[in-house]
Image (spheres, rainbow, N blue to C red):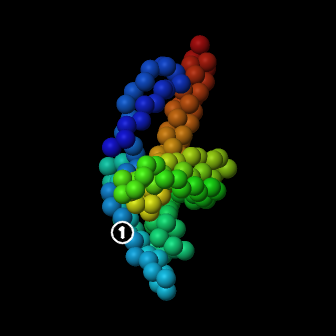
Amino acid sequence: MITIWRRWPSSGKQQEEPEHFRLDYFSVQSGSNDIATAAVKLACGEEVKAEAANGNGPVDAVYQAINRITDYNVELVKYSLTAKGHGKDALGQVDIVANYNGRRFHGVGLATDIVESSAKAMVHVLNNIWRAAEVEKELQRKAQHNENNKETV
């Protein structure tokens, strides 16, 4: 499990924060004359959700299933695959950029299987989106609190 360190704008202190979204399981079926199909199980906070979807290849099928689970309208803008290491020990690193509500988010995934790397990269994007929303909520809460304090002076 990857741990994220967040610095809250108000306190300047770091605190450990586990990922909100976590890839629990995925399975894909694909062939030269078959429609790619993926089944994905994703932990969303305390809840685990599963969905299946078809796509234009196994990576797209996984992304479609993840989008169904989260209801986030994420648009893939950039996809890059690079090899890390050599031979049978090589890992595939997927770097993606996705657009969500007019903002761009970066994600990275690393695994021996490129479909798994791709899924991890999208989950990374989703966690970045979720954290950005949480920070925005906190800033709005603090702004409202400050506004309420001005009224009571």
**Which residue is rendered at x = 37% and y = 37% of the image?**
3
Q: Which residue is mark 1?
A: 27
Extreme-bottom residue of the structure? 33
**Which residue is rendered at x = 39% and y = 43% of the image?**
19
Residue 46 at x, y percent in the picture: 32, 49
Residue 141 at x, y percent in the picture: 53, 31
Q: Is residue 48 left or right of residue 62?
A: left
Q: Residues within 10 Å of mark 1 (few under 14, many from 20)?
A: some
The relative height of residue 67 versus residue 140 in the rendered view (above or below) is below
Residue 22 at x, y percent in the picture: 37, 51
Q: Nearer the viewer, residue 45 or 94?
A: 94
Locate residue 16: give its quadrant.
Answer: top left
Extreme-front residue of the structure? 87
In this rendering, does residue 148 appear at all? Answer: no
The amino acid marked with disc number 1 is Ser
Q: Nearer the viewer, residue 128 or 112?
A: 112
Q: Nearer the viewer, residue 14 or 37?
A: 37
The relative height of residue 146 versus residue 100 in the rendered view (above or below) is above
Q: Secondary structure at mark 1?
A: strand
